[in-house]
Amino acid sequence: MARQHTAGDETLDAILERIQNDLFDLGADLATPEQHGKPEWEPLRILDSQVERLEQEIDLVNGEMSPLTSFVLPAGSAAAAALHVARTVCRRAERTCVALSGTEGEIVGAPAIKYLNRLSDLLFVAARWSNDKGKADVLWKPGATR
């Protein structure tokens, strides 16, 4: 959904397109549990290199914005709002994977959990980027509605 609002931003749209492909890799990783012994085929796994790429993209996007001085509300442009929703869904997926990894007999690879953690951070900075590189962020005003 977020990509419907980022089509004019080549940098962000390319990042999101790669993420969509990574999410299918992540689904394949989670759907194919690790097995003892040699598998019949090489299962698709999230790799540390995919996590590292996310970290590089976070640095790229975040590097063009001023540091935050307040919490950011999930608002602003349509792209930013959609990216904040995606971040919320991603955090929920991360919590679910962490819980699954603590279940006896279930194995979730560390790179998969790291990927979700870094992805939610990327989605946050992407939302800020979509708000005129943070200049149009809607900031929290503590106690303003009392």
Image (cartoon, rainbow, N blue to C red):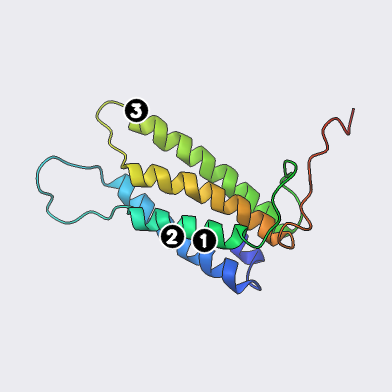
Can residue 1 be seen by looking at this rendering? no
Q: Tally the numbered discs.
A: 3
Residue neighbourhood size for the residue with mark 2, other residues' Cα within 10 Å, grouped as few (<14), some (14–19), many (≥20):
some
Whether pointer 1 and pointer 2 mark residues with C-beta atoms closer than 8 Å, the reply is yes
Q: 12 or 133: nearer the eye?
A: 133
Where is residue 57 shown, x and y percent of the image? 51, 61
Q: Disc 1 or disc 3, which is closer to the eye?
A: 1
- In the image, taking residue 13 as reference, residue 27 lies left or right, namely left
Instruction: Tell me the amino acid under the disc marked 1.
Output: Glu
Where is residue 137 shown, x and y percent of the image? 76, 52
- Quarter of the figure with the C terminus: top right
| Residue at image location 47% in from the left, 60% down from the top | 20
- In the image, taking residue 64 as reference, residue 111 lies left or right, namely left
Please name the residue that numbered disc 1 is placed on: 57
Instruction: Tell me the amino acid under the disc marked 3.
Output: Gly
| Residue at image location 33% in from the left, 42% down from the top | 110
Instruction: Tell me the amino acid under the disc marked 2.
Output: Arg
Residue neighbourhood size for the residue with mark 3, other residues' Cα within 10 Å, grouped as few (<14), some (14–19), many (≥20):
few
Where residue 53 is drawn, which disc sits there?
2
Whether pointer 2 and pointer 3 mark residues with C-beta atoms closer than 8 Å, the reply is no
Where residue 4 is drawn, which disc sits there?
none
| Residue at image location 18% in from the left, 56% down from the top | 42
The quadrant where residue 33 appears: top left
Residue neighbourhood size for the residue with mark 1, other residues' Cα within 10 Å, grouped as few (<14), some (14–19), many (≥20):
some
Question: Would you place residue 123 above or below residue 101 in this image?
Answer: below
The quadrant where residue 96 appears: top left
- Quarter of the figure with the N terminus: bottom right
